[in-house]
Image (spheres, helix red, strand yellow):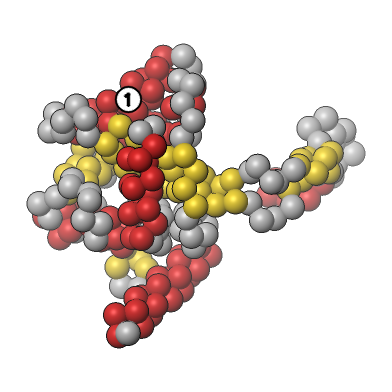
Amino acid sequence: MNASVPKQYLYLGGETVLERTLKRLLSVVQIERIVVPVASHDNRWSGFDIFQHPNIETCIGGEERVHSVLSGLRYLRKIAGPEDWVLVHDIARPCVRRTDIEKLIQSSLCSGVGGILAARVSDTLKRARTDMDCTDTDDSTDSADTDSTAEISATIDRTQIWRAFTPQMFPLVELQHALERALADGELVTDEASAMELLGQAPKLVPGAVDNIKITESADLQFAEMILELQEQAECQETQK
């Protein structure tokens, strides 16, 4: 994002992304404890009052997402029961709706397997050629513009394609085993559902609001702030009825 600080410490309407996300999770009564993996060199988090909350704890994160998630799961195993479930959420998704989290929890528990928040793809999807001859490309072309030279090789059927969001919810012990097994097999999974799938599981796709965006670019901050304002307005209108 070309930011001088990690994106979780960037501000959204007076509060950081981190604070916004944690407060949203704390609003869900079914969530008993939150563990936040933080980088070993990160000393910013200790300056935020929200980490004084009795339901929030921290642990040392890892090099990749999967390592940080595993660190959090291992920490939870010390205090959780063998039958407990866990939700894994990206700190960079502050706009997730409380009602969607509650829906995911109910659906996952009913399934016995687990599930993820997701949304059907509405755009037409194109696959790019991978065997293009780029020898004629001007050497002065900026690397950021190289995608503009791509060609379409096929249109993908989108009817069975979903966008994966977080939280993703699974039994704690089973998810830890799945992630450890994936790493042992050399699979650097990018989400928890992928690890469960490698074990032959079929997690549920729980439809969630498309405004559950992940902040990855600078423009996403303005978009997220607008989403949060609209959500707050809707909540106020609902309470006044």
Q: Does residue 49 appear left or right of residue 124 in this picture?
A: left
Residue 88 in percent (x, y) is at 34, 42
Taking the image as shown, residue 143 lies to the left or right of residue 56, namely right
Quick check: can you spot residue 14? Answer: yes
For the C terminus, the quadrant is: bottom left
- Say if 20 sits above or below 55 in the image: below
Q: Measured from the top left, where is residue 48 in percent x and y?
A: 19, 58
* Tag count: 1
x 29%, y 80%: residue = 239
- Is residue 142 visible to the viewer in this orientation of the structure? no
Depth order, front residue of 236/45? 236
Instruction: Name which residue type carries label 1.
Output: Glu
129 lies left or right of 111: right
Q: Residues within 10 Å of mark 1 (few under 14, many from 20)?
A: some
Q: Residue furthest front?
A: 110
Q: How far across and how far down the image is residue 87, in percent?
A: 32, 42
Q: Residue at x 19, y 27 (%)?
A: 82
Closest to the observer, 40 or 235:
235
Residue shown at 64% from the left, 43% from the top: 161
| Residue designated by label 1 | 174
Q: Farthest right residue?
A: 136
In the rendered image, the residue lying farthest to the top is: 185
Name the spot of residue 164 as percent of width and height, x first. Answer: 51, 45
Q: Which residue: 18% across, 45% down?
A: 33
Query: Relative to residue 176, is residue 234 depicted above or below?
Result: below
